[in-house]
Image: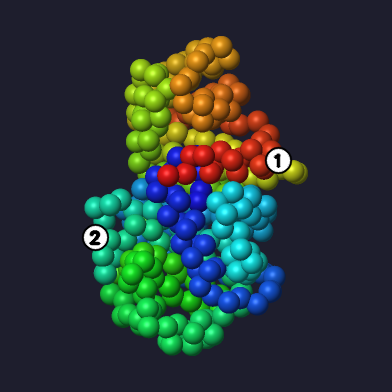
Amino acid sequence: MIFFRIVYARRIVRAAVTVGLLLSFACCAATSAVKKDAVAGNEFAVLPAGALAYMRIDVKPSRGLVDDILTRRKLNTKTVKTFFDRTDTAVAAVYPASNESAGEGLRRFLMIAYGKNYPAALSSFSLFFNPDWKKTKSVSGKKYWRYQKNHFSLFMQKNQARISDGDPFFTEDGAETPEIFNAFGADADVSAWITKPDFLNTALARMDIPITVPALALFISASKRGEDWQASFRLETPSQAQARGLVSVLSLARNALAGAYIKDPELASLARLLLSEPPSVDGNALILKSPSIPESVLAGLIVSFSI
């Protein structure tokens, strides 16, 4: 999931959808889940280090956005809806193709969903009689279900589901959540940490903008405000001077965008949205804030920029 041109983000959405399609959920509303295996202030500790992107979503306030995205993908079935009915929060990570810490093959994504009354016993009983699913032993010693044909792994307890295309468990160190992530996205309904925002320069090249962004990390936070959404972007650079330089360049670009022709209409819409408010500097970081965005518009942008 979850935000503009996050590399391989659609793989995570597909994983969540597949879980919903596989399990026969009975209707039940979710309540707050306690993340017992998460370290306070370090939510991504439950995910392996080395990801391209880490994401977190509070499902309840974001439910309309999630449903809109799934509907546009023609994936919002009854079982998928009920999966999200039972899910309170989720954290996810997307890994590079060179990652080899997945046990059975490459781990490209891992999502951990927290909820209530997931049908763990019923799903294990059903999968036991399905010849396509095999009980597999993790590198951590725990057992999970593996669907080898589609490279899909599932582990489920009453209040937690682990979904991956590799081993849903790991023995290496967990990720260290940057302090700025907690500060920047403390009250966000959806937040993300892009550890390697190389796609920014690719996007600039597609818009024929001859600049290179010295990006160390990108943090994204979005929250629902009434019927609309507001998003903020924090781009970390090596120095305050470089952040100020980017503000100067983007301020010029902002003034030119109104009458400029950009051959990629989706990128043009995104650029105009992000630069609708003046950019600013906070220490070594460039800050961009969006105006209020209708939920349907935000869903359309996410779908447009999913890979």
Residue drawn at the location 61% of the way across and 76% of the way down:
25
Which residue was labeled with disc 2?
100
Residue 3 percent coordinates (x, y): 51, 43
Residue 106 percent coordinates (x, y): 28, 61
- Above or below, 21 relative to 12: below
Provide the secondary structure element on which disc 1 rests.
Answer: strand
Q: Nearer the viewer, residue 6 or 306?
A: 306
Provide the secondary structure element on which disc 2 rests.
Answer: loop
Question: Which amino acid is tagged 1?
Answer: Asp
Which residue was labeled with disc 1?
228
Residue drawn at the location 64% of the way across and 67% of the way down:
78
Count neighbours of disc 2 (C-alpha within 10 A) and say few if under 14, some if 14 to 19, many if 20 or more: some
Residue 304 percent coordinates (x, y): 51, 39
Question: Which amino acid is tagged 2?
Answer: Glu
Name the colour scheme: rainbow
- Above or below, 291 relative to 108: above
Residue 15 percent coordinates (x, y): 46, 62
Residue 271 makes an appearance in the image: no
Count neighbours of disc 1 (C-alpha within 10 A) and say few if under 14, some if 14 to 19, many if 20 or more: some
* Residue 213 in which image quadrant: top left
Q: Which mark is residue 147?
A: none
Q: Quadrant of the C terminus?
A: top left
- Above or below, 7 relative to 22: above
Residue drawn at the location 53% of the way across and 44% of the way down:
303
Residue drawn at the location 58% of the way across and 31% of the way down:
289
Give the alpha-carbon distance from disc 1 to disc 2, as whole Å.
Answer: 41 Å
Give whichever of discs 1 and 2 has the lower sequence position.
Answer: 2
Q: Nearer the viewer, residue 57 or 243?
A: 57
- Above or below, 104 relative to 135: above
Number of numbered discs visible in the structure rendering: 2
Side of 153 relative to 2 (left or right): left
